[in-house]
Image (spheres, rainbow, N blue to C red):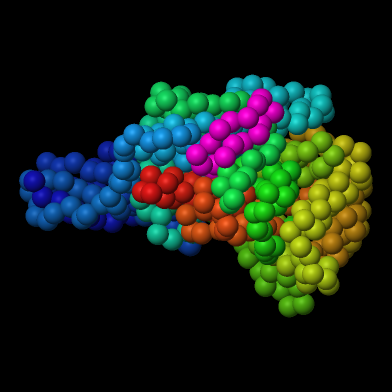
């Protein structure tokens, strides 16, 4: 049996029969099996949009050997002493737990919110009643903030191929579509993520892992640079090691860690708003047509370095998605985006943010506590303006002209919009940079200036970075780790999950 890797160009609506015929013609073989290695959309020429597909072909009629694949994680397993307490059940937390359980550890995941089904009902109730749930919302609860997102599985992190393979295979076993293993830009969708999150928890529990829901980490007991126990809202948990995977919205956790001697630095992060267009506008601009058979919805990624302004870019683009009220705390007003797997909604949205250095923005030195307070005050400012969770908004054209929009606007946002002087609500340097960036984006994508801009995007990245080793071990501590987005060293599902896995492997190899 021989093996060969080939590349094909196929129509966007190709069938399995079309693929097999193309392989047979290219290799001149009849008896063969194929597996898709990679698949990406080539839309550079709107008249010839097609899939680029890399295939592995096995056949007795050809010669060649399969290339070496990414090896699996090497997880040393033996009986371990003590208990590892993990706080947070997002990607960093759950994959840390899964690896440690396989390695023979006894672990407990402490989650301030409820299990995913209860959380989902609380989110729906919030959107219909306006009653905020401090434990279960778009930021907190089983699965973390990523549960209600587009579920993108792309990452720019290097040297994480084994960790990425483990994460991808775990998701597929938990019910994710197999295409996430080969698509250039894979995504899960919120509707899939609810079930996947539930399945990952069951897999963890079947290996002996313990979940404590509706349990808040309140403090750590530290003696001589070593954590001996975690104080929670349900009592004290003795711990041989503690791994904090709380996400980047858990500000009270960061402050508690600072009080316990954990070092943090401020770092550059992003501030801005969310922009929204009809999906047809984006489809026409990117594809030259309202609909492309075989492709869900058009995407975009935009960057600009305007003269006299901060760098501006789009982030977390959600094709066919919705804008959601993503406040982590009752008196804040921020937005985020999510999409379902089919990406078949009427609107497209994305964060439009400026890269910020707080010292330069505020013209003074800002310490870690001051950075948290700055973001909180900005989120509260938007809350005070709207009197709740309506999203302050303007049309992009009005924002560019520093006008307050009049009348209503079509939007996916469930809590309603309120016309606002966004130029005044945002820090002046940020709003000025967004204006310059949007002018550039409007020249790149036809019809871009016809969209709307709304709300505050303050959680695309963390303003802090913990002082730690590559494995996540905090400086000055022998058994305390901070991993995931809250550490300031990773962002997104894949890199956060990989960050947690590295911490788990470091423990397993001790």
User: Which residue is pictured at 23% across the width and 43% down the height?
Assistant: 34
Q: Nearer the viewer, residue 80 or 359?
A: 80
- Decide if residue 376 is on the left or right side of residue 146: right
The image quarter in which residue 80 lies: top left
The rendered magenta stretch, by its main secondary structure, is classed as strand
Do we see residue 317 in this rendering? no
Residue 275 percent coordinates (x, y) = 72, 51
Residue at x 91%, y 44% (from the top left corner): 384
Relative depth, front residue between 506 and 185: 506
- Looking at the image, residue 374 sits to the left or right of residue 162; the answer is right
In the picture, residue 449 is in which quadrant? bottom right
In the image, is 329 to the left or to the right of 44? Answer: right
x then y, percent, for residue 29: 12, 48
Percent coordinates x, y for residue 425 in the rendering: 88, 55
- In reply to whether residue 76 is colored magenta, the answer given is no
Residue 491 x, y percent position in the rendering: 57, 52
| Span colored in magenta | 228-243
Where is 81 relative to 40, above or below? above
Q: How many marks?
A: 0
Please tell me which residue is depicted at 61% across the width and 25% down the height of the picture.
213
Residue farthest toward the front in the current orientation of the protein: 224
| Relative height, residue 304 to residue 319 (above, below) | below
Does any portion of residue 5 appear in the rendered image?
A: yes
Task: Please name the residue shown 78% across and 65% down the image.
Answer: 366
């Amino acid at each position: 049996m021989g093996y060969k890797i080939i590349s094909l160009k196929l129509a966007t609506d190709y069938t399995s029969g079309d693929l097999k015929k193309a392989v047979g013609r290219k290799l001149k073989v009849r008896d063969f099996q194929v597996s898709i290695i990679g698949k990406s959309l080539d839309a550079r020429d709107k008249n010839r949009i097609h899939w680029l597909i890399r295939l592995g072909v096995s056949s007795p009629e050809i010669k060649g050997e399969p290339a070496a694949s990414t090896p699996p994680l090497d997880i040393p397993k033996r009986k371990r002493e003590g208990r590892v307490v993990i706080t947070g059940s997002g990607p960093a937390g759950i994959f840390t737990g899964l690896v440690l359980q396989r390695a023979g550890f006894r672990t407990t995941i402490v989650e301030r919110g409820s299990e995913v089904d209860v959380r989902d009902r609380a989110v729906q109730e919030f959107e219909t009643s306006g009653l905020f749930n401090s434990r279960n919302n778009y930021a907190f609860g089983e699965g973390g903030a990523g549960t209600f997102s587009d579920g993108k599985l792309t990452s720019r992190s290097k040297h994480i191929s084994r960790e990425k393979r483990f994460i991808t295979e775990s998701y597929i076993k938990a019910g994710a579509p197999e295409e996430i293993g080969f698509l250039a830009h894979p995504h899960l969708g919120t509707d899939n993520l609810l079930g996947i999150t539930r399945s990952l928890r069951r897999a963890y529990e079947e290996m002996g892992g313990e979940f404590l829901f509706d349990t808040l980490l309140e403090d750590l007991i530290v003696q001589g640079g070593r954590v001996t126990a975690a104080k929670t809202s349900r009592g004290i948990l003795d711990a041989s090691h503690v791994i904090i995977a709380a996400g980047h919205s858990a500000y009270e956790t960061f402050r508690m860690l600072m009080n316990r001697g954990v070092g943090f630095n401020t770092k550059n992060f992003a501030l801005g708003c969310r922009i929204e267009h009809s999906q047809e506008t984006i489809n026409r601009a990117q594809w030259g047509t309202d609909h492309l058979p075989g492709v869900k919805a058009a995407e975009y990624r935009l960057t600009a370095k305007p003269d006299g302004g901060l760098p501006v870019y789009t982030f977390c683009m959600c094709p066919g998605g919705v804008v959601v009220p993503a406040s982590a705390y009752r008196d804040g007003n921020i937005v985020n985006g999510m999409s379902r797997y089919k990406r078949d909604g009427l609107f497209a949205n994305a964060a439009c943010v400026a890269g910020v250095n707080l010292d330069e923005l505020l013209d003074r030195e800002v310490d870690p506590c001051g950075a948290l307070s700055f973001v909180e005050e900005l989120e509260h400012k938007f809350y005070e303006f709207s009197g709740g969770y309506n999203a302050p908004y303007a049309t992009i054209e009005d924002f560019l002209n520093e006008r307050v929009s009049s009348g209503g606007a079509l939007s996916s946002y469930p809590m309603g919009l309120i016309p606002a002087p966004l130029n005044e609500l945002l820090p002046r340097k940020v709003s000025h940079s967004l204006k310059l960036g949007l002018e550039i984006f409007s020249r790149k994508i036809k019809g871009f200036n016809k969209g709307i801009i709304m709300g505050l995007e303050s959680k695309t990245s963390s303003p802090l970075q913990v002082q730690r080793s590559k494995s996540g071990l905090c400086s000055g501590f022998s058994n305390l780790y901070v991993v995931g987005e809250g550490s300031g060293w990773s962002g997104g599902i894949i890199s956060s999950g990989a960050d947690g896995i590295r911490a788990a492997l470091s423990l397993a190899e001790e």
